[in-house]
Amino acid sequence: MDFDKFRIRPGAKTDLARRGTGAGSVVPQKKEQRLRRISELATRVDTLQDLLYAEHKHKMLIVLQGMDTSGKDGTIRHVFGEVDPLGVRAVGFRAPVGEETERDYLWRIHRQVPGWGEIVIFNRSHYEDVVVTRVHKWIGRAECERRYREINEFERMLADNGTCILKFFLHISRDEQRARLQERIDAPDKRWKFNPRDLEERRLWADYMRVYAAAIENTSKAWAPWYVVPADSKSSRNLIVSSILVETLESLKMTYPQPAEDYSGVVVK
């Protein structure tokens, strides 16, 4: 399956309205086939994460962005469902508070980046500072472009220091968001997730699509690529993200470290 079609090439024009929110023929058409493959990939992610932690020569940062209900939590739950918690962290970013407001917008981000052998997943990220702030006109175009440059330099610095970066925009349709928001309201066990502000942000849908497209277009680099993942189908979304993650981890050609001495043949009594 060719998942590279979802990658945004550096400098490529990005128009989210022209990118489908359904995966089409790229993934198996039957849901049970997709779920089976996701389960297989989850096992592979577990093996590769163990290698990453043991080898201790790489770091991995995964950025998840998307509109409300696009499935950031669900992606983490299903893609990393079989991974040993050792060496993996998920970090959620909300509006800055306290000492975060006293410093530059990247300060709280830099504190959470992965160490050697670690995978860190950002549920929202520094991209809120060039998306939400721009949609609500809290910053102007010049400030936004300056932040694009800073983000590119920041991510390049992370990459130069051994961090493998994958950025996923989970792309859902406005109709699908409406259905998922309604489900949150109607289901007692999901109602706690509903925030009336989600409806206010939904009215700005067109602005969000335009601003997200600009952010992706300006910050998809060879060292920190963006993938626009069709996310109307949860199983298709999880399959695509899992596949790209496995392919990327395998490309690192990792091996388990060997002990200083040869202990083969030693019998424990």
Image (cartoon, rainbow, N blue to C red):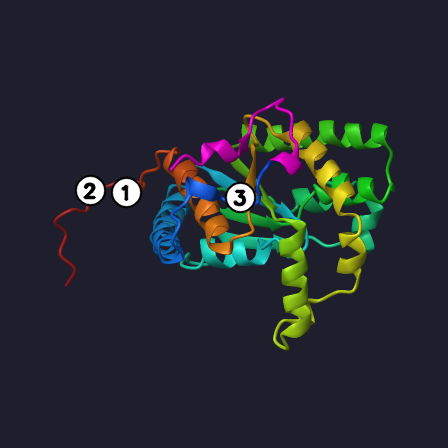
Magenta stretch: give its range.
1-18
- Of residues 199 and 253, the one nearer the viewer is 199
Q: Amino acid at mark 2?
A: Asp
Q: How far is mark 1 from mark 3, CA to CA?
A: 22 Å
Residue bearing mark 2: 262
- Residue 131 placement (x, y as % from top left): 75, 41
Q: In the rendered image, is residue 71 in sight?
A: yes
Q: Amino acid at mark 1?
A: Pro
Residue drawn at x 16%, y 60% is 268
Of the numbered discs 2 and 3, the one sitting upstream in the chain is 3
Residue bearing mark 1: 259
Residues at marks 1 and 2 touching, judged by CB atoms closer than 8 Å: yes
Kindly indicate the quadrant of the structure image that contains residue 33.
bottom left
- Residue 190 placement (x, y as % from top left): 63, 71
Residue bearing mark 3: 115
Q: In the rendered image, is residue 80 in sight?
A: no
